[in-house]
Amino acid sequence: MLGYIWTRHINPTQDGARVGEIWQRFPKFIIGFVLTFVVGLALALGTPTEISSRLPAAIGEANTFRVIFFILTFFSIGVLSDFKRLWQEA
């Protein structure tokens, strides 16, 4: 949207942003985030009271996995990094 507004109104150019180009450059994972949020919201709003009372314990257990995956993310970045090449660039 910002690309369209910029090329049409703020800094108009001869060949403004076309809809196809905007769609091509749009990061599609954002659609997944929005859909995941909507599904999660629908599930949360439809949860019975007896299940929602057990939610704090489940969050505590899920937090353990969040920490593990957070550590694994940075570990995998470190494993895939070529520090020799990075050091040569500096």
Image (cartoon, helix red, strand yellow):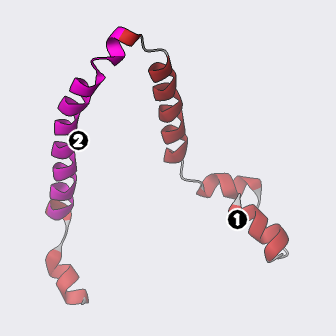
Magenta span includes 39 = no
**Element on which disc 1 rests:** helix
Gap between marks 1 and 2 measured at Cα: 35 Å
**Element on which disc 2 rests:** helix
Magenta span includes 64 = yes
The reply to whether residue 15 is in sight is: no
The foreground one among 54 and 20 is 54
The foreground one among 57 and 40 is 57
Rendered residue at 45%/27% (across/down) = 40
Per the image, the residue denoted by label 1 is 3
Q: Amino acid at mark 1?
A: Gly
Per the image, the residue denoted by label 2 is 66
Rendered residue at 20%/80% (across/down) = 85
The reply to whether residue 88 is in sight is: yes
Rendered residue at 66%/51% (across/down) = 23
Q: Nearer the viewer, mark 1 or mark 2?
A: 2
Question: What span is in magenta?
Answer: 50-78
The 10 Å Cα crowd at callout 2, few under 14, some 14 to 19, many 20 or more, is: few
